Image: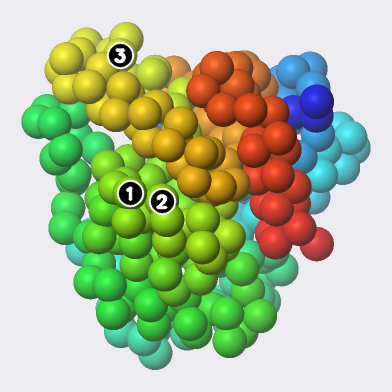
């Protein structure tokens, strides 16, 4: 079965964010990119979808990937609401006029799809706690509607049941992370064909970190695994994406680990269907 990395960040290298980003301080660094692409190729990754960065590194990586036998797609940068989580991955908007301008910028730079950030990240301090409030469902709907109107597919970073449900109901093409999804979220994803990329490896990596409450991280991962099993039974398409590049998730090894974790929970067919759908919806 072919190995896909449906969620990674070529700007990052699996070490700490600041250190990885600093390598691109003077512009996208081809040597750093070549290291990441070589690691992906060595692991057997054939398709790679980037999750965006503020420096245009993933976009250059997409164009370099072909030499490594890898099909790649990039959103250029992620788009988030000013004042909320997302600055480490992209650019912010305050109102819909600014949002539309960012969509035009993605098009101008040759991005393949839109990456939206509509919630915070898991804090691992208290079970279920996220780093900031998520966007209201109405705003999420509007952002997705506008991106679709511009002909883009939408990859959505969403944690928390309200935000995941809003993304799936609005026809977003994929939910990234999707921690704390409930059964309403899962049925909405099954119904609309929204692919779920549960990024299990990214949270598993937190188990080893000294600043993490291990009990919280374990409970979070267990809950996610249960939801993944239920989702597959309900007909949700799942895809292999590890958040490669994040601290503790190396390129290549991340995708291999994510596939292993997913196949311990769901059948190969559900995973193939999800991967294939990501390829159709996000790659040109
Ligand atoms: Zn990511």
Please say if the residues under marks 1 and 3 sit with CB atoms less than 8 Å apart: no
The residue labelled by disc 3 is 207
- Observer-nearest of 53 and 157: 157
The residue labelled by disc 2 is 186
CA gap, disc 1 to disc 3?
26 Å
* Above or below: residue 210 compared with residue 188: above
Mark 1 secondary-structure assignment: helix
Q: Please indicate whether residue 186 sits to the left or right of residue 58 in the image.
A: left
CA gap, disc 3 to disc 2?
26 Å
Q: Please indicate whether residue 204 sits to the left or right of residue 43 in the image.
A: left
CA gap, disc 2 to disc 1?
5 Å
Can you say which quadrant of the picture contains the C terminus? bottom right
The residue labelled by disc 1 is 183
Task: Return the x and y of residue 95 as percentages of the image width and height.
Answer: 30, 84
Which circle, 1 or 3, is nearer the viewer?
Answer: 1
* Above or below: residue 232 compared with residue 51: above
Task: Return the x and y of residue 113 as percentages of the image width and height.
Answer: 63, 65
Q: Is mark 3 within 8 Å of ligand 1?
A: no
Answer with the quarter of the image where residue 42 lies: top right
Mark 2 secondary-structure assignment: helix
């Amino acid at each position: 079965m072919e190995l896909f990395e449906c969620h990674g960040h070529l700007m990052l290298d699996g070490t700490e964010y600041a250190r990885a980003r600093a390598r691109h301080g003077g512009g996208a660094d081809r040597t750093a990119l070549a290291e990441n692409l070589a690691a992906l190729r060595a692991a057997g990754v054939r398709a790679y979808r980037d999750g965006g960065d503020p420096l245009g590194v993933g976009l250059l990586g997409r164009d370099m990937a072909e030499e490594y036998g890898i099909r790649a797609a990039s959103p250029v940068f992620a788009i988030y609401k000013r004042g909320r989580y997302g600055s480490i991955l992209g650019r912010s908007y305050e109102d819909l006029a600014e949002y539309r301008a960012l969509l035009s910028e993605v098009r101008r730079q040759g991005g393949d799809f839109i990456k939206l950030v509509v919630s915070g990240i898991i804090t691992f301090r208290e079970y279920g706690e996220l780093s900031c409030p998520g966007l209201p469902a109405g705003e999420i709907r509007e952002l997705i509607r506008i991106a679709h109107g511009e002909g883009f597919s939408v990859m959505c970073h969403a944690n928390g049941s309200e935000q995941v449900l809003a993304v799936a109901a609005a026809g977003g093409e994929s939910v990234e992370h999707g921690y704390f999804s409930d059964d309403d979220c899962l049925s909405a994803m099954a119904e609309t064909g929204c692919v779920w990329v549960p990024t299990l490896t990214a949270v598993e990596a937190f188990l080893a970190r000294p600043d993490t409450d291990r009990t919280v991280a374990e409970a979070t991962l267990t809950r996610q695994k249960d939801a993944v099993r239920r989702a597959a039974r309900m007909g949700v398409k799942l895809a292999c994406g590890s958040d490669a590049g994040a601290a503790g998730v190396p390129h290549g090894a991340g995708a291999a680990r994510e596939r292993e974790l997913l196949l311990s929970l769901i059948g190969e067919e559900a995973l193939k269907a999800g991967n294939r759908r990501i390829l159709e919806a996000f790659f040109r």
